[in-house]
Amino acid sequence: MRSAASAGRTGSVLRLVTFRREGSTEEQFGVLREDGRAVAFRGPAEPGRVDESDPLASVEAFLAAWPYSLARAEERVCELAASGDASKPLARSDVRLLPPVPRPPALFDFGLTPRHLRDAALGLVRREIRPPFRTAAVLLARLAGRRAIAVRSPFPYYRGDPCALIGDGEATSWPKASSYLDVEPELAVVVGEVGPGASLEQADRAIVGYTIFNDFSLRDLQWPVMLSLAGPSGCKDFDRSNGLGPCLVTPDQLADPLDQEVRVRIGDRISWSGSTREYAAHPREVVAQIASGQHLVAGSVIGLGTVPGCCSLETEQWLLPGDPIEITFDGIGTLYQRAPDRLPRLSPSRWRSRPELARFQQGQV
């Protein structure tokens, strides 16, 4: 099955971005070139003169007009390349890349990587369950992991906070209630409008593109939150907790979203690798499942789940304040983010204390 966006391509590479010029508050919509420069589809607009009927006026207009807007974007890229005068390319240092969809109407997050679910559960059990019960709990976690591998649709998910998005180059927050901040790199899907009861083919055609989702988590708060049966939001719902970017890659540019190598670097201290081949379902199946019970508004973002082997809970290698974070998906690019440089005065952790954090806390020397 091919997306409707896969036919009749011009060969141009479309990595869609929303950005601001340095020193400006105006959002512009365009493409990220292979050399890393950003090019706006349209020049800076006069105040109050943005034409939202133009599918290239903003990412919201582009999403609302999908799939017609794709052909128009390709035409505009060719026009810009031929003209050489309008919308001059801007160096990455001269722009701030925002989340490719800065204001998504909905943010869904799935857990479609059974190995991560198993290994994360084991990590929690080892820290939360004391001997002699730990051995039995580990066995149960492993059995649950094997069962997760066999489980098919409907896939469980929770809703994240679209207001907590941060883009490329931005820092997350570090709430005082936690000493164990973690990253969770995920492949994310952005869709156009999807009507309720959409078929797999309709869901496939509605996929506008793919981007990187970084689902920051507070791991020492996760166990009691999960035991409450209220979902994981209590350990994931905090300011600036959802990273998204750097660009939106259209389906024709990503031959197989489930065959992408993933690499994570935390400064010079930590390096992890994984693959999207471990996802248990294709994005179109996930879109169709959500649409089976509701209308999906254009611009909705769907995270597929943490790439196994690429987070602290699985590896026991933990972030420090100020750590630069680089998440690379081969077919998409690299999302740069960072942990905050300074911390509030932290509350005592439910887990072992981390004395290495003391020097970063406010009021500490």
Image (spheres, helix red, strand yellow):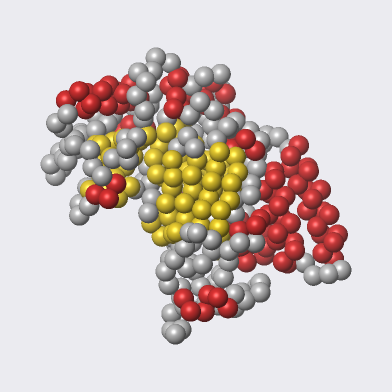
Judge whether 58 appears above or below 323 on screen.
above
Rendered location of residue 186, percent (x, y): 54, 45
Which residue is farthest top?
A: 8
Judge whether 233 appears above or below 200 on screen.
below
Snapshot quadrant of residue 298: top left
Judge whether 173 appears above or below 357 on screen.
above
Give me the residue at 42% from left, 51% from top: 336
Judge whether 344 appears above or below 83 on screen.
below
Is residue 163 at least partly visible in the picture?
no
Rendered location of residue 161, percent (x, y): 47, 52
Work out whether residue 316 or residue 250 is closer to the camera in this orientation and state it.
316
Work out whether residue 45 or residue 113 is closer to the camera in this orientation and state it.
113
Snapshot quadrant of residue 154: top right
Work out whether residue 308 or residue 272 is closer to the camera in this orientation and state it.
272
Is residue 4 at least partly visible in the picture?
yes
Describe residue 138's horizontal placement relative to residue 305 as left or right. right
Describe residue 145's horizontal placement relative to residue 348 as left or right. right
Describe residue 9's horizontal placement relative to residue 117 as left or right. left
Give me the residue at 15% from left, 32% from top: 86
The N terminus: image quadrant: top right
Give me the residue at 55% from left, 58% from top: 270
Rendered location of residue 364, percent (x, y): 46, 84
Give me the residue at 77% from left, 67% from top: 129
Rendered location of residue 327, percent (x, y): 49, 48
* Number of marks in the rendered image: 0
The C terminus: image quadrant: bottom left
Describe residue 298's horizontal placement relative to residue 19 as left or right. right
